Image: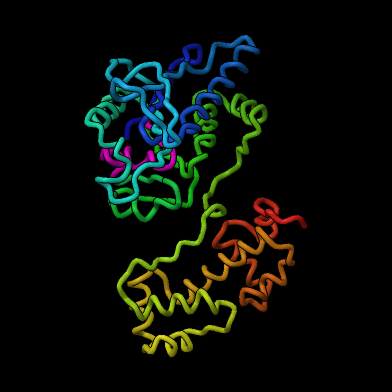
Amino acid sequence: MQITTPPPSNVPLRIAILALDGAVYSSIIGPLDVFSMANALREASGQPEFAQVSILRVGRRLPQSFNRIKIHTHGSIRETNRFDVVIVPAMMDGDRGQDEAFPAFAAPRLVPWLHRQHGQGACLTSVCAGAFLLARTGLLDGRAATTHWNLADRFAAAFPEVRLQARKILIDEQDIITAGGVTAYFDLALYLVRRFGSSELAAGCSKFLLIDPRRSSQSPYQQGQFQKSHADEAIKSLQEYMEQHYAEALTLARLAGIAGLEQRTLLRRFRSATGDTPIMYLQRVRIENARRQLELSGSSIDQIAWQVGYKDTSSFGRLFKKITGMTPGGYRKKFSLAVI
């Protein structure tokens, strides 16, 4: 591990944000806005600016974001500038395996350039799918990282040497920092302001830009992902049954009977196909349905607990918090779209 040493406090932090084809435009401009606010706050208090930010392309032409906006840049990675921090943005391009996902990451100069910046003391950072590029460098092998919760399975399959912790919003490995979901660029930018500036400066940016500085988990934002890309038709049929009859009293014995399997065989085949036990899967199906009701209905939490199969509201609340990281009431307050 290489410990990144920040420049003296009177010298601006040199930050490079990579502009890549398929990037989420806001994950480039958003951090720039946070760093610009930090500079403005520093200037207002008579202090040196916090950072000098360069948006860099890879080749000669201007890259295009995933929403087809041309990304204007300050230069390219062909230049020999050394940076203190490099940010790989969120991406919305590619939908297959490591070699085909996020084609912009395959640019031949990118990985060597990142290695060179890292070797010269830069802290490499990523947002969302940007972790795929950092993992390609090999610098994350044996270390912890996060990425968007919806990309966790693909990332784990492509980079088994990385200790993926996809529930976390941000992981700091000193010289490499990864941030989770798409808008985690706010979390990353505030964290960089705090780490290389001060807590006071980060708090000022948070207040002026109305950014929640307290997010630590992606769990409340995860949508139910139920593994069905397997060839075990008996298990797939049972999954579909559970998703339609989740509110019923489905014991392991009853599930085994429905599947026509011995209980031990069911446990083995179900875990092999889905990664879950049947009861764990049922719990996640129930909680996913409870989440939707909390978001869209005005039903009470007791009513929702009963409707998804739980007679004991306390047990429902504990399980809900274990899976989502929030209480049912806290989840409703944060995500409800219903007029209650």
Q: How is the image coloured?
A: rainbow
| Nearer to us in this view, 73 or 164 | 73
Q: Quadrant of residue 75?
A: top left
Q: Quadrant of the N terminus?
A: top left
Which residue is at 34% across, 78% downward? 233
Percent across and percent down for residue 31 are 51, 28
Q: Quadrant of residue 278?
A: bottom left
Which residue is at 56% across, 17% downward? 39
Q: Quadrant of residue 110?
A: top left
Percent across and percent down for residue 296 are 67, 59
Which residue is at 31% across, 45% downward? 101
Residue 313 covered by magenta stretch: no
Percent across and percent down for residue 220 are 57, 54
Q: How many numbered circles does the render carry?
A: 0
Bounds of the magenta segment: 124-141
Q: Is residue 235 above or below residue 8?
A: below
Q: Is residue 198 above or below residue 314?
A: above
Percent across and percent down for residue 125 are 40, 33
Using residue 190 as the reference point, say whether residue 89 is left or right of it.
left
